[in-house]
Image (tube, rainbow, N blue to C red):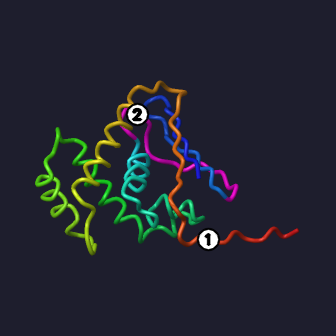
């Protein structure tokens, strides 16, 4: 799956273009355009870097629509918020990342949270993507390939022909 995020003029309704591997192409609305990294890029980068195949973007790659992803959203949003918080810090220590992980993930029932090293690496990826996004001018775009495995592909309806 390929997801493209066009940089639009500030305050316009933002969107991404999703090109799934099954040939389906559509626009996914995503808040207001601006210089800060779009929420959907944050979630895509976090899910990709943490290897989350059953999150929002993995679900979309599998053929689900957002209404079918409600149960996956809380986990992805919470992990994304944690990584964003870590990315906002200057050189956080593993102990600081563990403390934040305990606070932020207390609402989730996870057997074992990602390690401080993995979370720190995802936070650095967000910092890189935020810098790339900030350099874009309206009319430019960032694209990402979603290549994590898709566990449960949603079957497409048959062609009525």
- Residue at image location 13% in from the left, 48% down from the top: 93
- Few, some or many C-alpha atoms within 10 Å of disc 2 (few <14, some 14-19, many ≥20)? some
x, y percent for residue 22: 68, 59
Which image quarter: residue 99?
bottom left
- In the rendered image, the quadrant that contains the C terminus is bottom right
- Residue at image location 40% in from the left, 64% down from the top: 73
x, y percent for residue 72: 42, 68
Q: Would you place residue 45 above or below residue 127 in this image?
A: below
- Using the image, tell me which numbered label, if any, was put on residue 154: 1
**Residue that protrudes farthest toward the front in the picture:** 117
The count of marks equals 2
- Using the image, tell me which numbered label, if any, was put on residue 34: 2
- Residue at image location 40% in from the left, 56% down from the top: 47
Q: Would you place residue 154 above or below residue 43 in this image?
A: below
Q: Earlier in the sequence, mark 1 or mark 2?
A: 2
Instruction: State whether residue 13 appears in this view.
Output: yes
Which image quarter: residue 78?
bottom left
**In the shown orientation, is residue 79 left or right of residue 21?**
left
Instruction: State whether residue 109 appears in this view.
Output: no
- Using the image, tell me which numbered label, if any, was put on residue 14: none
- Residue at image location 73% in from the left, 71% down from the top: 157
Which range is magenta? 22-37
Separation (CA) of disc 1 from disc 2: 34 Å
């Amino acid at each position: 799956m390929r997801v493209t995020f066009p940089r639009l003029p500030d305050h316009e309704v933002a969107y991404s273009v999703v090109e799934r591997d099954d040939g389906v192409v559509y626009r996914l609305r995503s808040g207001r355009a601006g210089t800060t990294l779009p929420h959907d890029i944050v979630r895509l980068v976090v899910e990709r870097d943490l290897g989350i195949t059953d999150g929002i973007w993995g679900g979309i790659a599998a053929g689900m629509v957002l209404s079918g992803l409600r149960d996956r959203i809380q986990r992805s949003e919470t992990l994304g918020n944690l990584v964003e918080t870590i990315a906002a810090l200057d050189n956080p220590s593993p102990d600081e990342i563990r403390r934040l992980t305990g606070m932020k993930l207390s609402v989730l029932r996870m057997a074992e949270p990602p390690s401080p090293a993995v979370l720190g690496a995802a936070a650095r990826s967000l910092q890189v993507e935020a810098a790339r996004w900030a350099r874009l001018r309206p009319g430019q775009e960032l694209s990402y390939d979603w290549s994590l495995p898709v566990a449960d592909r949603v079957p497409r309806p048959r062609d009525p022909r």
